[in-house]
Image (cartoon, coloured by chain):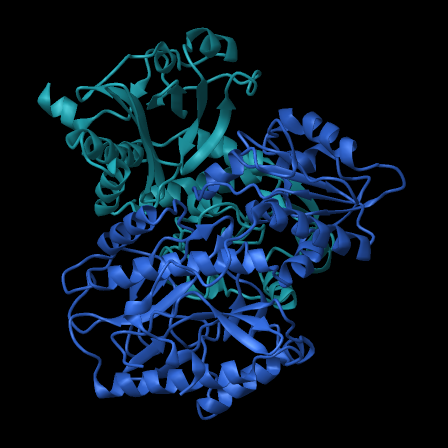
Amino acid sequence: MTDQLMAARRQRVQTAMAEREIQALVLGRQDNVGYATGMRRLWTSGTRPFGAGCVLIGATGRAHLLSSWDSGVPESVPFDDLYPLTWNPEIMGGAMKAIEGLPTAHRIGVDACSPGFIRAASRFAPKAEIVPCDDLMADVRSIKLDEELDLIRRACQVAWAGVNAVLDQPKHELPLSLALTATTNQGATIPSSKPIVRFDGNATIVDIGVIVDLYEGGVGGRFVDGHREGNPHLAGACRDGATHDDLAASATGRWLVRGLGMGYETPVLDPTRGRDCTLRTGMVLSVTDGDHRDVVAVREGPPDVLSVNSRTVAGS
Amino acid sequence: MSPFFGMGHPEAVTLLSSEPLPDLGRMQSERLMLLQQRMADQAVAGAVLLHGPHVAYATGYVTSAVDSTHAVHDRAVAIIGAQGPAHLFANDPPPALIAETHLPLSPELDESIPELADALRMVIDGRDRPRIAIDELTGAMLRSGLFDDFDTVDASRVLGPARLLKTEDELACIDRAQRINEVAMEEVRGFCVPGTRRSQLAAVFVNRVRELGVEDILIDPIFQPMPKNRSDPPRTSTGHVAFPTGVGDPTFAEGDVVWVDTGIDVEGYASDYGRTWIVGREPNQAERTLFARWAAVMDASLRAIRPGATLAEVARAATKADGGLRPWLPHFYLSHGVGVESAEMPMIGTDLGYSFDENFTLKTGMVLVLEPVTWEDGVGGYRAEEIVAVTEDGWRPLGGQPGYSPFDT
């Protein structure tokens, strides 16, 4: 991931803050922190309780990060702009108060919140209104930059390495171990989604998702003799302007179309959700129809498939 | 020698737990009772829970260990009233839950808030501004104003005290998770040789754990080569070393001192395995001395653990055993609890301060993960973790105590 990409993403967030008249943006979700600053943190599974992981200030243009060390912190954030891990709400309140531009903010954006944070904010920023800004981050993130597409392609290749490892040894007793060893040996030691390998007659059904360099990749399918079956129309229907009805009409099985970037993103469309969503050029989507999953970038015409199996391309 | 070290036999590591297997139904009903008692104590009329470990505690529904973004969008939600069953809103809940199950909610999405409102009304009477405990307000929940007519408090106020005292079934889950974690890591140790990368060790660990029947890895496996001096990079706010950074894929070289830390999940309960390994050689005399200091700290800490002892007494015993130095990482603790989360109360020696430790008393059923660190600039540090449960007459170990190889005990 280049410094240019990190700077471009941060600028997009700062611009969106200015448009919404948000003087300070407090991010608790680690994927949002990663997007806005490029920070890397130890991966832990599942949800995390809300806490201020990052504070962006409009007036100063500074990003302040929760970290007791500079490892994983991008060079664009100086050491003095870190506030350390603490178990003590008083110390955290003091750290928030010390951030230039936060106590004087009138509108503090948050990507999520908790009753405790609202009470704490009433002390460290007494004049501030707390404004939900999950949608600000979601909107900024939904349209991908070119380098993001490259990073997602690369992550999809790692997912394919997992799939190919399963297909290469069809009689192996522990096929999931083959997949996880293959992805882990490419540095992706964490799955993004629950890995699936199962057998149905002579077919092997595999679905692998990984996070590589903070970006997600994934692929899934039903394979017979090493070849993926079917070419569902759903991925092809993911074009600029496509609606829920368009996607529902193209799906043949249990389907899910959802944003993909630094993990699972919006929009989320499935038979019951996302009825008012319209796809836009630049979105990247994980498209599942039955056992089949691809990652595509939405275009005016047919989408770019980012989850192309390099082995197939090389062999074809 | 302390009783703990006397039990350390690497060859004796076994999955055959001395604990009875957990009775999951009993565990669920006892936890719900504890939670509703804590709610009654604090006049909390209902709880709305979105955080995975909270949902697991209240309903028994354990989500897969996936990326936080997936956990957020696919999350289960629990709503608990002052009495009656727990209500679980989730995809494909297993049949054995005692909670009442419903179709999933998507509190991330504005369009799903009306369904959340219906669910809330089903359990909690909204008249007279009732107090409800809630652990997260999503943007959609904030925008909707759904909770404006409630007196909202952090859910940790009721879940924290409930979770503090473990039932026998909870202890059995932790014990089992820890034993499986230990067996896997004792095998991984053999692969920690010069030229190996962290990711390769992670692959061995993940696969061995799966063979032992556990799918969920709670933390990206940590195998971190440590510096020899506190002033070495990375730069820290404490002046001590940075751990765990969780960044990069280092290749191990002969002589590296590697701090390892892994955690897995059994029925929603976390394990916590920490050791210090040395790559490609035996520990030298200075490193053995560090380990001896660590063992003395562990021994002294254990001797201080009993119902009625304060956290400060344990911290003082540990500090005295290391000649007045505080033998733990200053950004962490001497000890933390473990349960549905990898690090929970009680925590000893944090920046909550001395008065917190002085006013917190150990009780039977609490769990402590002791993780002292002894350090000598120029040599490095020794760190390892052990889990104990506080019992009526002191403590008992959870896990199989596989020893500290390559350090002798």
Quadrant of the drawing holding the C terminus of chain A: top left
- Closer to us: A89 or A38: A89
Farthest residue, direction left:
A315
Q: Is residue B373 visible?
A: no
Farthest residue, direction top:
A249
Give residue B236's position: percent from left, percent from top.
41, 70
Give residue B231's position: percent from left, percent from top.
34, 78
Q: Residue at x 63, y 75 (%)?
A: B392
Q: Residue at x 64, y 74 (%)?
A: B362
Q: Residue at x 32, y 60 (%)?
A: B183
Give residue B394's position: percent from left, percent from top.
57, 78
Residue A257, by quadrant, is top left
- Residue B337 lies left or right of residue B218; in this view the side is right
Give residue B54's position: percent from left, percent from top.
61, 48
Q: Is residue A90 above or below residue B133?
A: below
Farthest residue, direction bottom:
B323
- Residue A156 lies left or right of residue A52; in this view the side is left
- Closer to us: B404 or A148: B404
- Chain shown in blue: B
Q: Is residue B232 above or below residue A280?
A: below
Residue B187, by quadrant, is bottom left
Q: Is residue A194 visible?
A: yes
- Closer to us: A174 or B217: A174
- Chain shown in cyan: A
- Closer to us: B46 or A81: B46
Q: Is residue A27 above or below residue A151?
A: below
Q: Residue at x 56, y 74 (%)?
A: B348
